[in-house]
Image (cartoon, rainbow, N blue to C red):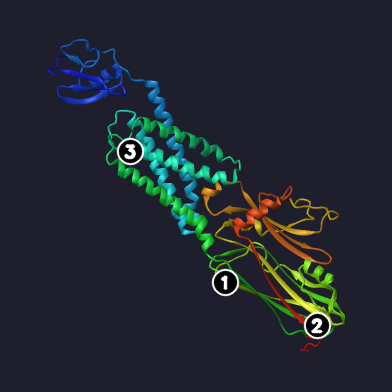
Amino acid sequence: MERPTKITVRPPDSRGLREVRIGSETVDSAWSLRELRGILRRHGYPKDLDLEDRRVVSWCGGGSDVWPDHTWRRRATIGFMAFGLVACAVLLIVIGFPDAFHAIRFAGRMTGWLFILGGVVEGAAAVATFDYWGKRSLTVSGALVLVGVLSALTVTTLLVVLWFQEREATWTTLAFFPHFFWSLWALWVVVRQKIWRGTPHPTKIATGVAITAVLAGMNFAYSSLYQPTAAPANLALHVQYGTPRMDLERPVIHLPVTLHLKNSGSVPLYVLADGWKVYGRTETYVEKSSELRDRRKTLEVGEDVARHLESIRRTILGTGPFTGPGNWFDPGEEYSEQKMVEVPATAKYDVVGADLDVMVMRKDRGTIDLDEFKVAQPSWDKKSRFYCPPEECWEHLAYHAEVGYSSNVTTVTRKPRYVTSWWILTPDEAVWDASISSYRGKGLIDDEETKREYRKYDLFTVEAHAAIPFADVVRPQVP
């Protein structure tokens, strides 16, 4: 088939791609002789066209045997670059999705949406990879690849820095550590090829990436570091005695005790462990003041020093949990409960005292699986993970659940943490406590780790005390 229009094959460019013209119009570019024939067939030329006929085809910068494209190298670059960008897109969306919809604070949700947006950009960059290392029909393909690589490097660097704070090996390190090294390789590739050349407004693009990275970092720092520190947490407790009443039939005095709690701070609080107890106190009165050494012993155990009292003993009259582990209180929320304690009228106490202790955790430092945490696990139940033979330990109730981090960005760089609460009743005393650590119900708790987690989650205990002379109890009003 005769065509009046001549075909011109231009010299190969830096990538080995040769421009194809029909007359004065550029119709496409070819990597190989086979691809050139395909282009010509699409424009009406026969598949057996003699490409060596100089009257039909003009070869510039090399004949039909000059095709310097390194096909496998180029395809390997495309595949490895696209795979890394897609993996980063998945990583960003997986990290950002929980925070975008379930973060504790608004700033955390904003960070989550920024991560999701970054994932969408990474996906677009992966698609642009095929065009940039292909025919480059889109002028923005290089810019998209550049933005994708810079975003991947920024995110993986953040994850690596967070990981180095604790250096805990988790399965998620298998995701972001290899990707960190991939992003370094990708940055080397785009810098070596000066991918920004031909990109419209490269300075504006780089500025936009920098602003987005700074914004995400500021949101993360604000929601994870500044806000939980700046917002004050406070809990007010109060213990008050009611009017004692003599039982109508038995030599027993009913002593009402009102326990009151109020979240007087500005952040919600989880109750990890709490308890109340009312006790009768007996003491020996001496005319002569106690010796200095005796006062020192009293101070060592945390008791008040009484100048004319010694041999102080306590007998528990009533004890138990208050609100119970797993409850939480919003700012301004209050809770009151009245306990009724039976005191023997013939007792020889000097003072009746009441204690209320509550250990709490800031709700903006983490989340607790309350459905699991509120379920008590008895130490005498052999099916419980907290089973302990009675001859080895006091019988107690244990509460255990996983503690979620305040940000999913932190979650993927840390091992899980667990909160464990105990309520122990001995023949002479009632004890309650709680801790947060990597302890999962078996093995020993690391004291140093527990101290670190106390600071991270801002655990603190509030106490309230009240006492009345026993004489005010044994002369109650008769109903």
Residue hosting label 2: 470
Q: Is residue 249 left or right of residue 4?
A: right
| Res 21 quadrant in image | top left
What distance separates the C-alpha of mark 1 from that of mark 2? 33 Å
How far from the left and from the top, in percent, is residue 9?
A: 22, 19
Label 3 vs 2, first from the N-terminus: 3
How far from the left and from the top, in percent, is residue 115?
A: 44, 47
Element under label 3?
helix
Residue kind at label 2, given as amino acid type: Phe
State the residue at coordinates (80%, 69%): 296
Residue hosting label 1: 264
* Label 2 crowd (10 A; few <14 / some 14-19 / many >=20): many
* Label 1 crowd (10 A; few <14 / some 14-19 / many >=20): some
Residue kind at label 3, given as amino acid type: Ala
In this rendering, is residue 188 above or below 410? above
How far from the left and from the top, in percent, is residue 59?
A: 21, 15
Element under label 2?
helix
